[in-house]
Image: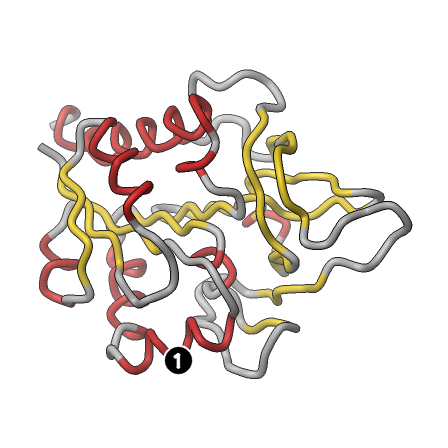
Amino acid sequence: MVTIAVIDYDMGNLHSACKGLEHAGAIATVTDSHHEMQQADAVILPGVGAFDPAIQHLRSRDLIQPIKDIIASGKPFLGICLGLQILLDGSEEGKEPGLGVIPGMVRRFQPEPDIAIPHMGWNQLNFVQPDLSVWQGLSADPWVYFVHSFYADPRLESDKAAMVTHGSQTVTAAIARDNLVAVQFHPEKSSTTGLQILTNFVASVRQPVYSR
């Protein structure tokens, strides 16, 4: 059975994500252990909250370089919400440097009349990489659940996997590169669509075993 390490750094409730993974047939282990992350078949970096405290908590647990090493190793890796943002170089929300895995910055939504910030609630994805394995079986422009005031702005267009429109602003909702996928929305709060995404992620982890 697929084992997935869910990184614990005191930035969010991990219970819902673990339940979704277990429903998809994986064993989810909440951990801040480098060894357990290395031994797992895949790793998930969730997160809720502000950019600077997230980086500080990762640093205090000596997790920054291990996360970079795991991504560089080719192990399947999924970032969720704040776990997407901290993969970039930095954020307009704070002063700490990000992990720098994906070139780019995290930007603040610009105020508009009659547009709420944070961007909170259900919205539709527009796929940029429609053949990505985590999107398999989803309807066109599926609805998912967002809660964020800042958004990822990757420097490379090739890193963008899906977009979302809030008011007049169309921003990155997901990124993907090689073994790395990260989403701004919350799959664990996105009903059947979110569960399908987590199921697809687990299936993509299994696939190399089946293809041998």
Residue 3's spot in the image, x, y percent? 13, 42
Give the colouring mode of the picture. secondary structure
Q: Residue at x 68, y 64 (%)?
A: 107
Whether residue 197 sits left or right of residue 164 in the image: it is left
Check disc 1 and report its element: helix, strand or loop. Answer: helix
Identify the image quadrant of residue 67.
Answer: bottom left
Identified by mark 1, the residue type is Gln
Residue 8's spot in the image, x, y percent? 26, 62
Image quarter of the N terminus = top left
Label 1 sits on residue? 56
- Taking depth in this image into account, of 174 and 27 the one nearest to the observer is 27
User: Image height check: is 142 above or below 72?
Assistant: above
- Taking depth in this image into account, of 134 and 143 the one nearest to the observer is 143
Residue 87's spot in the image, x, y percent? 46, 63
Q: Residue at x 30, y 33 (%)?
A: 20
- Taking depth in this image into account, of 169 and 49 the one nearest to the observer is 49
